[in-house]
């Protein structure tokens, strides 16, 4: 009898696999962490809205925070604090979720603080010590902001161009909020338009358009033979092993990361972006480096496309290691790129440890993104100086092999015209960021299009539809394309 009882007991723990497959967990074990991160999202967006974008509280709550589910408080007040002297915010009353704080730092924008930090810790946060570039108002475009002629050349239809602009601004969906639109043709600004409350100096978050800025910096190091596309990354993966040389993650190369094909464990694309993973460095004060090193390898590198913020952040770490010292690393984006092409209104933000969050956390304006697009349109040359090789530009425009079965829609941190789009030039390529951040390069028409947005909800603004609409203003027979 005793043997029978034990057998029945054992059988209870040997249920068929199909029974386990049907199990569903109803309780959200991540809820407390999600609440903390939601407070952190509001802290960063509210802090940058006020002190980087120089918007009012009313504007911030109306547009920047429209993205946040149930923001804390209103423009009239609530369970948040704005310290105008320190240029910092604290979101949420103490309780089950901690109060989350963010503070503006010179040259980099707002930095999210750890849950156990207070305003007393602000001075320990990083700053950008390089002096800003001088006044651009007397320097001709594109190096500066002086524009004396925006007349349309032959072959460009003014009515059609205005119609394309109206298409971008007058959206049927109230969730699509266009802030700015620029059309640059043969290096000259043909059209520039801003929504109320926005002007050419207004910085807003690039979200993942930052990834295209990151890959540009990686390319500069690659051109100097300091960073390789196909050699092992040489990273010290977490958790550390007694024989680190046998870690299968050593097979991952920079090419895999930039093609979003690392093979590492999925976080963002299984709904955990606002619970763990890169969300902890974006919104909760965790290290962007340590978190990026912890994912396990679940697929052979290069075989599966999986859009993950941490892949870009691993590339940033490889860039830091290639540069070799912290001081040079922190000055590198300014010295190598931003200052060279006059992107004087661009802040590349860091985590609280001073590591660049170049997967999302960049604040800039439409004109600086137009300059960035022009660098690519001009084949990597600015004022006669080669800043980026044509080979690297070819790489970012080449479809990631793992996208062959899904439309060849992604290259190296740039988005490509998918196979099923035949209404726009196939040579076009684009940055893309959440809430509608696009810098579009159309080489066959010598054209740059920049659209900035504060979309929210389901969003859905199409960058390729925008190209289609703008090109209606151009006559290839007469515009030299």
Image: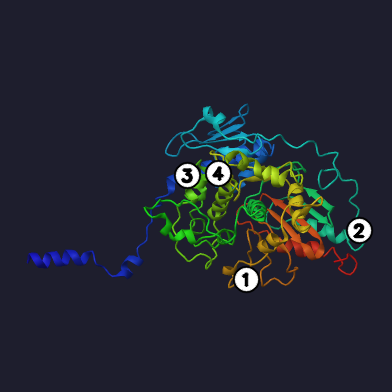
> Judging from the image, what secondary structure is the residue with disc 1 in?
loop
Q: Residues within 10 Å of mark 3 (few under 14, many from 20)?
A: some
- State the mark number for residue 41: 4
Q: CA distance from mark 2 to mark 3?
A: 53 Å
The quadrant of the rendering that contains the N terminus is bottom left
Of the residues under marks 2 and 3, which one precedes in the sequence? 3
Nearest the viewer among 400 and 49 is 400
> Judging from the image, what secondary structure is the residue with disc 3 in?
helix
Q: CA distance from mark 1 to mark 3?
A: 37 Å
Residue most extreme to the right = 154
- Between label 4 and label 2, give the one nearer the viewer: 2
- Between label 2 and label 3, give the one nearer the viewer: 2
Q: CA distance from mark 4 to mark 3?
A: 10 Å
Q: Which residue is mark 1?
A: 407
> Judging from the image, what secondary structure is the residue with disc 4 in?
helix
- Between label 1 and label 3, give the one nearer the viewer: 1
Q: CA distance from mark 2 to mark 1?
A: 36 Å
Does residue 348 appear in this view? yes
């Amino acid at each position: 009898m005793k043997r029978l009882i034990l057998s029945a007991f054992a059988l209870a723990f040997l249920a068929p696999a199909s029974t386990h497959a049907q199990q569903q967990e109803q309780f959200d074990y991540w809820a407390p962490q999600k609440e903390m991160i939601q407070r952190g999202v509001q802290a960063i967006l509210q802090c940058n809205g006020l002190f980087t974008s120089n918007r009012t509280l009313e504007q911030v709550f109306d547009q920047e925070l429209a993205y946040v589910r149930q923001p804390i408080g209103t423009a009239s007040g609530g369970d948040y604090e704005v310290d105008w002297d320190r240029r910092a915010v604290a979101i949420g009353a103490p309780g089950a979720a901690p109060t989350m704080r963010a503070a503006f730092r010179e040259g980099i924008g707002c930095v999210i603080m750890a849950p156990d930090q207070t305003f007393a810790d602000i001075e320990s946060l990083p700053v950008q010590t390089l002096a800003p570039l001088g006044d651009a108002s007397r320097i001709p475009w594109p190096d500066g902001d002086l524009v004396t002629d925006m007349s349309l050349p032959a072959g460009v239809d003014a009515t059609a161009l205005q119609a394309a602009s109206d298409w971008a601004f007058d959206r049927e969906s109230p969730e699509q909020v266009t802030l700015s639109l620029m059309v640059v043709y043969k290096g000259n600004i043909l059209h520039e338009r801003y929504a109320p409350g926005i002007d050419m100096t207004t910085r807003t978050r690039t979200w993942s358009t930052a990834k295209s800025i990151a890959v540009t910096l990686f390319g500069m190091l690659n051109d100097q033979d300091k960073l390789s596309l196909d050699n092992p990354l040489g990273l010290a993966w977490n958790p550390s092993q007694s024989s680190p040389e046998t870690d299968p993650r050593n097979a991952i190369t920079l090419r895999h990361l930039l093609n979003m094909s690392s093979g590492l464990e999925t976080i963002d694309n299984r709904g955990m972006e606002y619970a763990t993973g890169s969300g902890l460095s974006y919104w909760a004060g965790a290290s962007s480096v340590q978190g990026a090193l912890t994912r396990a390898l679940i697929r052979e590198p290069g075989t599966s496309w999986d859009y993950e913020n941490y892949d870009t952040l691993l590339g940033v770490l490889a860039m830091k290691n290639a540069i070799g010292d912290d001081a040079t690393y922190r000055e590198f984006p300014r010295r190598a790129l931003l200052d060279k092409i006059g992107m004087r209104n661009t802040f590349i933000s860091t985590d609280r440890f001073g590591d660049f969050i170049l997967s999302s956390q960049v604040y800039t304006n439409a004109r600086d993104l137009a300059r960035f697009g022009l660098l690519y349109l001009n084949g990597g040359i600015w004022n006669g100086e080669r800043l980026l090789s044509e080979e690297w530009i070819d790489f970012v425009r080449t479809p990631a092999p793992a996208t062959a079965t899904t439309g060849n829609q992604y290259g190296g941190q740039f988005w490509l015209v998918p196979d099923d789009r035949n209404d726009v030039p196939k040579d076009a390529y684009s940055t893309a960021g959440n809430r509608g951040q696009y810098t579009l390069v159309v080489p066959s028409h010598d054209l740059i299009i920049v659209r900035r947005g504060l979309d929210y909800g389901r969003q859905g603004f199409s960058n390729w539809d925008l190209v289609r609409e703008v090109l209606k203003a151009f006559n290839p027979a007469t515009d030299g394309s």
